[in-house]
Image (cartoon, helix red, strand yellow):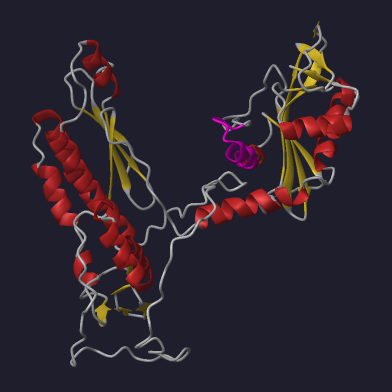
Amino acid sequence: MTERTIYLDPDPRDWRSRKICVRATRWYAKIGLDRDGYVDSTSSRRDDPELPTAYTEAVDRARDASIDRIWYDGFPGSFSCGNGPRWVDLFVQFPHVEATVEALRLAELDRDYSGLHALADLLALPIDDWLAPGERELVRGVDFDSQPGAFLRFLRGKAKGRGVRLNGRATAGSVWVRPTLSLAEKQRREMFPEQYPGWEDRWTGYVQSDNAPVRPWVGGRDQGLSYGATPVHFRAVETPGSRDCPCGMDLREPFGDGKEHTAHHAAWAFGIRVPRNLEWWGDLAVVTTQSPTSWRKLTYQVARMPQKENHYDFRSWSHLDEPEATPDNMRAYLLKVNGYVIGYLAAHDTSEHRSWDLIDGSRYGDQDDTLRPRIILVWVADSYRRQGVGATLVQALADDFGCQIPDVSWSSPVSDAGQRLARRVSPAGIWVS
């Protein structure tokens, strides 16, 4: 499927024209309604550009059903979407692209939402039936169609959202499930009903019938060891209030079982794994804006670590397009240890500097117009900090430019960690710019 654009207004060349963009990915097609120029035009006339509530509700219903269907088929990722008034995004499987485009067109032009509701009805999955209480076997081709392993992962996610423990096992052609509700989840939902609108306890007190199927034992742990056990009791106590991990991620349980945080934290602590397709002959690599794309992509990946850790708006390296020379000689220094990039320094050359004696509260000196290398950012993987890695990177920058470390300029304002490094390598003072 090729990318295409469907214009909804008579003149497609008009910047105010609304359009539907269709873009294919490996697992699904992304269909986006672009209302950006239309909203600006509407706002200039002092009209309300917001979408009607019935419109957004129909879109949300269709989107939830289509995303569930894509996850049900085994897609392991997540989705990021807009929901108006400027952008409306839907994600659908390829057989439903035309129906989705037509449903969006009718909703936008005629305020007819029946197409979106019909799409939601078509894609809706019997999740409530799958998570009904009781031990049973769901057979592939009869109860579900996706791979058993993917189907079980999907069910676990849906069960978790309902506070239910699935107790499931995938076989070659089926999935065994026994949804149960823990006492803690039951108490939480009963104490805060406003957080769980429409929730209904179908699991507490459920009695298995004598004719229910018995899950075959496949070895391993004995079954039924918790039968008749006393429920665990809980108490409210004072807990740490911080929600930020030092790596920059949120300590609260994220989507995807914390895998994104785990991967990011490992990279932040140990460095970025060097791709196998890169031939790295030395310890330190100098990457420029004219380097091969694989090197510039690796630099972009490493630059995400300090961006996330320090909550910067932008990465310090963004040169991912075709190779090009920059007037300020933008470059990055990557230090490799044990097959990981554990040190990163971004720099360029500039000629506007002021001296600083590194004393807190002291003023900067007079301006100096000498061309100097300027440190934009220094980052070291957590496990290698306070071992001289930052000083090694600064020395490499100075040697590469042909100057001494005191002649190097530092980006202002200099962070606390940057000041500690500067005092070690240039105790008499530094240049800032």
In this rendered view, identify the residue nearer to me: 89 or 212. 212
Q: Quadrant of the N terminus?
A: top left
Count the labels in the image. 0
Q: Which residues are magenta?
A: 301-315
What residue do we see at 74% from left, 54% from top? Answer: 339
Percent x, y for residue 347?
73, 27
- Indicate whether 6 appears above or below 78: above
- On the picture, is 332 further left or further right than 242? right
Percent x, y for residue 301?
61, 42
What residue do we see at 78% from left, 23% from top? Answer: 360
Residue 395 appears in which quarter of the rendering? Answer: top right
What residue do we see at 28% from left, 27% from top? Answer: 86
Residue 74 appears in which quarter of the rendering? Answer: bottom left
**Can residue 273 be seen in the rendering of this structure?**
no
Is residue 367 on the magenta stretch? Answer: no
In this rendered view, identify the residue nearer to me: 314 or 249. 249
Percent x, y for residue 50?
21, 26
Percent x, y for residue 412?
70, 21
Q: Overall secondary structure of the magenta stretch?
A: helix
- On the picture, is 402 further left or further right than 85? right
